[in-house]
Image: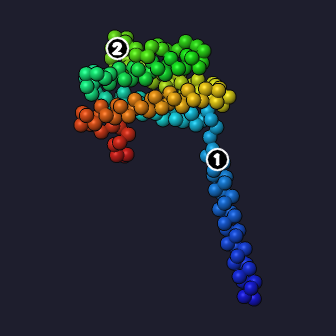
Amino acid sequence: MRNISRYIFVLLVLSLFSSVSVARAQDAAKKTKTPSEAVLEAWNDVGNRLITMAQDWPEDKYTYKLNPDVRTFQQVLLHVAGSNYDFLNQVGGSKLGEAANDPAVDSYKTKAATVEYLKKSITDGAALIQKEGDAGILKHLDYWIGYVEHMGEHYGLLVAYYRANGQVPPESRPKK
């Protein structure tokens, strides 16, 4: 009798572990992203952080520089958007946005114009990722990763602009 109880106990434990393993495997399968989904998620994540900063930063500080040898806050945003368009035009084979590496501030005189240009570059990039699908993304994967990283580097730079002005970047603020 004792051996039967032990046997039943072992079967129950094994059954429990196999159920948990199957559930974990199913969760992992659900969470696995395709290449285009992963790139889209990263593109939108960094892009939306930049958009939030562009909207949050006071317009009267859009001309702020960390030192005389670097871009203003606005110029960083315009640089990101312009570089995005340069890349998107190369990959997509079409003409989108102003693809200058450093678009002229005179073309985007207001905070609203700068924010809109940045937003559009992020939206157009997301649309191209979806249009290209996995095959297109894999064809240019190094470039997509590079441009997501490029946006991330400038996001980090703008964090320094916040800190130098005694401000907390939106992403570092307590969540409500």
Q: Judge whether residue 46 can be spotted in this image.
A: yes
**Is 6 placed left or right of 89 in the picture?**
right
Residue 97 pos. (x, y %): 49, 14
- For label 2, count other residues whose C-alpha is less than 10 Å away and answer few (under 14), some (14-19) or many (20+): some
Vertical side of 91 occupied by 106: above or below: above
Q: Circle 1 is placed at which residue position?
A: 30
Q: Amino acid at mark 1?
A: Lys
Residue sticking out furthest to the front: 69
Residue nearer the viewer, 60 or 70? 70
Vertical side of 160 occupied by 17: above or below: below
Q: Which mark is residue 102?
A: none
Measured in 3D between alpha carbons, the distance from the residue under mark 1 to the one under mark 2, in whole angstroms, is: 45 Å
Q: Residue at x 48, y 35 (%)?
A: 45
Q: Amino acid at mark 2?
A: Val
Residue 86 pos. (x, y %): 50, 17
Query: In which quadrant of the rendered image does the N terminus lie?
Result: bottom right
**Is 55 placed left or right of 22 in the picture?**
left
Q: Which mark is residue 105?
A: 2
Q: Residue at x 45, y 29 (%)?
A: 151
Vertical side of 60 occupied by 161: above or below: below
Q: Residue at x 38, y 23 (%)?
A: 77
Q: Hey, which quadrant is residue 68 in on the image?
A: top left
Residue nearer the viewer, 126 or 159? 159
Residue 117 pos. (x, y %): 43, 19
Q: Judge whether residue 61 can be spotted in this image.
A: no
